[in-house]
């Protein structure tokens, strides 16, 4: 292209015949150059974008119509640092977006509660449960808000302080999970003196200082929630019995902050928490959620000593699961995150011009389906002479905790 005769040939078509050989080579070279820059057709010299910046949440893109502001991917941080991009609206085949990308600012909410777990009291006057190393006790939730029907709102963890008890994360981009750490043992012991379980003593672990920042695009409906804690502190999880939530007993105020937080719970909050305990509410057990530990042995037994002063027997069950174990025993790990239970966490006035009702949709907490994982240790023990009890043992898949249901009993308190 530096040959002046060839350049003249390309510019002056009348001399094309006289310079046919040279021009043929020049035209071929020009075709190669044009083929190497197909995206810049109609976009000015060498495809340089406009001298000014594209609008926030958009980049310049060359189309057949020239340079067009094109939305960046949804959930990209705004380049002005003020929120997330909503992704605009792009219709396949169109050379311009239907909607340009917009930067969405978040609105922070402090939900009245987040139910972390339920510890079911087992039968047996000296029985206990312990969730320690390997236990997945905790929860996994997706969220639905009144602003839409989506149950797959994207989520992230942003600003939760370090904890020695719990770890959190996001699974598949839309499921928030918070489970106990291996180094933290979570246990409860029966203290009623009776062998039959008293559901009023079931314990509810409630995450008190959760904060959620809600992002909602009124342009294209894109929605996102960031999980954090108030002030970036470590999670504060308080424990209350069913009796306390029902107002039949006063809460234990020995733990700093527990009674103050309990006083902020409305009657509807307490009802929502209690609704998650099926045996407490004498509702039927959903087999997807409450999974039998051993279908091959539908019932296990607990017996007391034969006479006063005789040794007291302890019946210890440690649940370990993997794919083959589940297939044999009838329990299973739901890897598709099917919703197993849900609870509303109250209604708040939103800055988006509507009330937002948070609905936490709880799914399978256990996720390891290939290796073995110890879920918990259950110890059934009674000092009652002559007590004989048959029980069915379940795992609550929502929280990874044991539920033991008496079937038949003789001589037990």
Image (cartoon, rainbow, N blue to C red):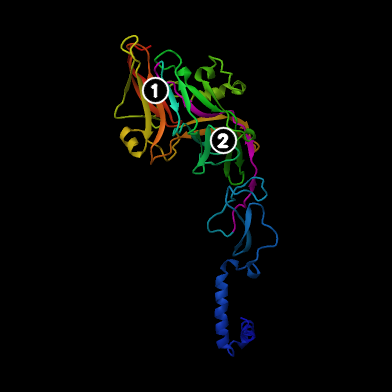
Separation of marks 1 and 2 at Cα, in angstroms: 43 Å
| SS majority, magenta | loop
- Please state which of the two labelled residues, at mark 1 or mark 2, is closer to the viewer: 1
Neighbourhood count class around disc 1 (C-alpha, 10 Å): few under 14, some 14–19, many 20 upward: many
* Residue 271: x %, y % from top left: 53, 23
Work out whether mark 1 precedes mark 2 in sequence or the reverse, and give the earlier one.
Answer: 2
Q: Residue furthest left?
A: 296
Q: Is residue 276 visible?
A: no
* Residue 131: x %, y % from top left: 45, 28
Magenta stretch: includes residue 122: yes
* Residue 407: x %, y % from top left: 34, 19
Please say if the residues under marks 1 and 2 sit with CB atoms less than 8 Å apart: no
Q: Which residue is mark 2?
A: 146
Q: Secondary structure at mark 1?
A: strand
Q: Which residues are magenta?
A: 96-124
> In the rendered image, which quarter contains the N terminus?
bottom right
Q: Which residue is mark 1?
A: 379
């Amino acid at each position: 292209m530096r040959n002046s005769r060839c350049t003249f040939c390309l510019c002056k078509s009348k001399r094309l015949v006289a310079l046919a050989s040279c021009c043929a080579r020049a035209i071929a070279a020009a075709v190669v150059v044009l083929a190497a820059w197909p995206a810049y057709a109609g976009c000015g010299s060498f495809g340089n974008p406009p001298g000014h910046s594209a609008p926030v949440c958009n980049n310049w893109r060359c189309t057949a119509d020239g340079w067009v502001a094109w939305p960046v991917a949804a959930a990209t941080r705004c380049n002005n640092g003020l929120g997330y991009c909503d992704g605009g609206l792009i219709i396949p085949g169109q050379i311009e977006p239907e909607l340009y990308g917009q930067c969405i600012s978040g609105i922070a909410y402090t939900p009245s509660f987040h139910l972390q777990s339920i510890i079911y009291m087992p039968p047996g006057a000296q029985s206990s449960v312990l969730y320690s190393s390997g236990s997945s006790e905790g929860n996994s939730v997706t969220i639905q808000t009144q602003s839409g029907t989506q149950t797959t709102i994207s989520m992230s963890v942003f600003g939760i302080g370090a904890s020695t008890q719990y770890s959190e994360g996001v699974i598949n981009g839309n499921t928030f999970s918070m489970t106990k750490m291996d180094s933290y043992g979570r246990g409860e012991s029966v203290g009623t003196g009776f062998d039959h379980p008293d559901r009023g003593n079931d314990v509810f672990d409630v995450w008190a200082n959760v904060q959620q920042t809600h992002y909602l695009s009124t342009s294209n409906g894109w929605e996102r929630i960031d999980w954090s804690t108030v002030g970036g502190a470590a999670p504060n999880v308080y424990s209350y019995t069913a009796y306390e939530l029902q107002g039949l007993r006063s809460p234990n105020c020995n733990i700093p902050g527990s009674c103050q937080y309990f006083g902020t719970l409305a009657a509807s909050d307490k009802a929502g928490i209690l609704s998650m305990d099926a045996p407490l509410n004498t509702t039927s057990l959903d087999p997807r959620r409450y999974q039998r530990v051993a279908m091959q042995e539908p019932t296990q037994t607990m017996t007391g000593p034969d006479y006063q002063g005789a040794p007291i027997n302890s019946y210890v069950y440690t649940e370990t699961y993997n794919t083959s174990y589940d297939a044999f025993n009838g329990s299973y790990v739901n890897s598709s995150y099917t919703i197993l239970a849900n609870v509303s966490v109250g209604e708040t006035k939103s800055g988006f011009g509507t009330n937002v009702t948070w609905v936490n949709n709880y799914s399978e907490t256990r996720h390891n389906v290939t290796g073995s994982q110890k879920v918990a240790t259950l110890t059934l023990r009674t000092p009652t002479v002559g007590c004989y009890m048959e029980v069915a043992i379940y795992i609550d898949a929502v929280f990874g905790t044991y539920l033991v249901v008496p079937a038949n009993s003789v001589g037990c308190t």
